[in-house]
């Protein structure tokens, strides 16, 4: 399952926002990836998220597989879409 969202934070995907994403992703027993342009990273990796340097207003795709994929995607989408 996947969902496309726009990063709403005025400063983009910064360290504290990345930490919130990792914390949320780690609650679920799913394989969860974040796609940005031609890069795909594990959403449970803070270094991976920070390496993307996603600015505000950019589209990303959250992809998850597993029993809790829907909940994991919704949780992360709510963090990035604020």
Image (cartoon, rainbow, N blue to C red):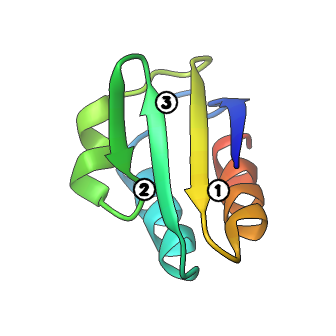
- Contact between marks 1 and 3 (CB within 8 A): the answer is no
Above or below, comparing residue 13 to residue 21 in the picture? above
Residue under label 1:
76
Residue under label 3:
12
Q: In whole angstroms, how far apart are the C-alphas of marks 3 and 2?
A: 16 Å
Residue at image location 44% in from the left, 65% down from the top: 22
Q: Residues within 10 Å of mark 1 (few under 14, many from 20)?
A: many
The x and y percentages for residue 33 are 46, 49
First in sequence: mark 3 vs mark 2? 3
Residue at image location 70% in from the left, 75% down from the top: 68
Q: Residues within 10 Å of mark 2 (few under 14, many from 20)?
A: many
Residue under label 2:
43
Q: Quadrant of residue 67?
A: bottom right
Residue at image location 54% in from the left, 72% down from the top: 30
Q: In whole angstroms, how far apart are the C-alphas of marks 1 and 3?
A: 14 Å
Q: Residues within 10 Å of mark 3 (few under 14, many from 20)?
A: some
Helix, strand or loop at disc 3?
loop
Above or below, comparing residue 6 to residue 19 in the picture? above
Q: Nearer the viewer, residue 58 or 70?
A: 70
Q: Is residue 1 left or right of residue 51?
A: right
């Amino acid at each position: 399952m996947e969902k496309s969202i726009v990063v709403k934070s005025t400063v983009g995907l910064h360290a504290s926002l990345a930490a919130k994403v990792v914390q949320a992703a780690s609650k679920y027993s799913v394989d969860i990836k974040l796609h940005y342009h031609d890069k795909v990273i594990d959403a449970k990796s803070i270094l991976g998220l920070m390496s993307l340097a996603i600015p505000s207003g950019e589209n990303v795709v959250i992809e998850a597989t597993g029993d809790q994929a829907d909940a994991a995607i919704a949780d992360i989408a709510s963090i990035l879409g604020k």
